[in-house]
Amino acid sequence: MKNHYILWVLLTILSLFACTEAGESAKNNNQDDIVRNVDEDIYPQTVGQISDFENILTETEENKLSSLIAQIEERTAVTITVVSMDSTFTSSSEFDHYIAGLHKSWGEHNQKLRDGILIGFSSQLRKIRVNNGAATQKILTDQQTKQIIDQVFIPNIRKEAYFEAFYQGMTSIAQVIAPIYPKSVGRVNDFENILSKKEEQTLTSLINKFEKETTIEIGIVTLDNTFTTTGQFDNYILELHNFWGVGKKDLDNGILIGISREMKRIRINNGFGIEKVLTDQETQEILDQFFIPSLREGDYFEALRLGTTQLMQSLRS
């Protein structure tokens, strides 16, 4: 009987040790789970092209952005997704990392989304990130992306114009990826509507008369930001010059004068044949002395008339 009692005591003690070890093990496992939950980002499921978790857009605005995204994808084959979120998703310091991870998570089973662009924004955290997929990085550089963020997104965000920030920002992205060049309608292409019909006719007559005299072709174009961005303006005028083929093909003796009232930009693009007789420095001097003064006064016709006349005089001498 005594031996049975001793055995029962030993079994009870062993049982208590086993329970204690199991409890400690469970406690440690729970702590591991807590650590993992803190360390791992939790990504929401996408609800479409516009995931406005922060509720900063109206239904009408979301529809307009979705329509624009569809147009951009049709034109460029690049998929754009937009997400807005508050601090319940991530912190300000981790925002960029979170958006990159979210892009990867959402694109895991969707190659078009993975290769495309995710625009992440938080009005609460005052943060924005444009995350480009691997395929998009080949046609939209980090520098171009930063330029669009600085010049288009941020100015609108500072005014709390969130819809405008997304709309204009995505339009600018599309212009860089696949710029649209309008068809030339003549020697004067006033797409910004800053000239009267009489002023257009005066400039056209001046240019045509000079072309008959010298064979040099001069074109004028006015543009707003639906065509290009401030940062891309100079390059756009260069490419538009080539697209329109201003100048005789065998002489490359064309000049394209590009102006934007909205973007406050002007560019004179000379063909290689012109550069032989009119240097970049001389062109800049004509800009500074004959175009800019009238432009500052808002007199676009006078700026074009005086500046174009001076270009002609310099090319004649």
Image (cartoon, rainbow, N blue to C red):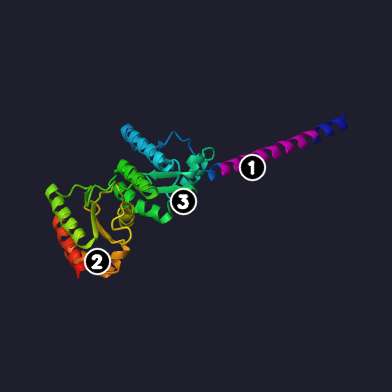
Image quadrant of residue 64? top left
Which disc, if any, is residue 283?
2
For label 3, the residue is 137
What amino acid does circle 2 point to? Answer: Thr
Compare marks 1 and 2 and give the one earlier in the sequence. 1
- The residue tagged with tag 2: helix, strand or loop? helix
* Residue type at numbered disc 1: Asn
Q: Secondary structure at mark 3?
A: helix
Spatial CA distance of label 2 from label 3 is 35 Å
Looking at the image, do the residues carrying marks 1 and 3 touch, with CB atoms under 8 Å apart?
A: no
Q: Is residue 214 above or below residue 190?
A: below
Q: Earlier in the sequence, mark 2 or mark 3?
A: 3
Q: CA distance from mark 1 to mark 2?
A: 76 Å
Q: Is residue 156 magenta?
A: no
- Residue neighbourhood size for the residue with mark 1, other residues' Cα within 10 Å, grouped as few (<14), some (14–19), many (≥20): few
Please state if 266 lies on the left or on the right of 86 as rendered.
Answer: left
Q: Is residue 231 visible?
A: no
Q: Is residue 48 left or right of residue 166?
A: right
- Closer to us: 282 or 68: 282
Q: CA distance from mark 1 to mark 3?
A: 44 Å
Foreground pick, 78 / 247: 247
Q: Which residue is mark 1?
A: 28
- State whether the magenta stretch is mostly helix, strand or loop: helix
Measured as percent of width and height from the top left, residue 148 is found at: 35, 51
Is residue 307 found left or right of 225 in the rendered image?
left
The image position of residue 107, as x and y in percent, is 51, 40
Mark sitting earlier along the chain (1/3):
1
- Kind of residue sitting beneath label 3: Gln
- On-image quarter of the C terminus: bottom left
Q: Which residues, given as a range, are shown in magenta?
A: 11-36
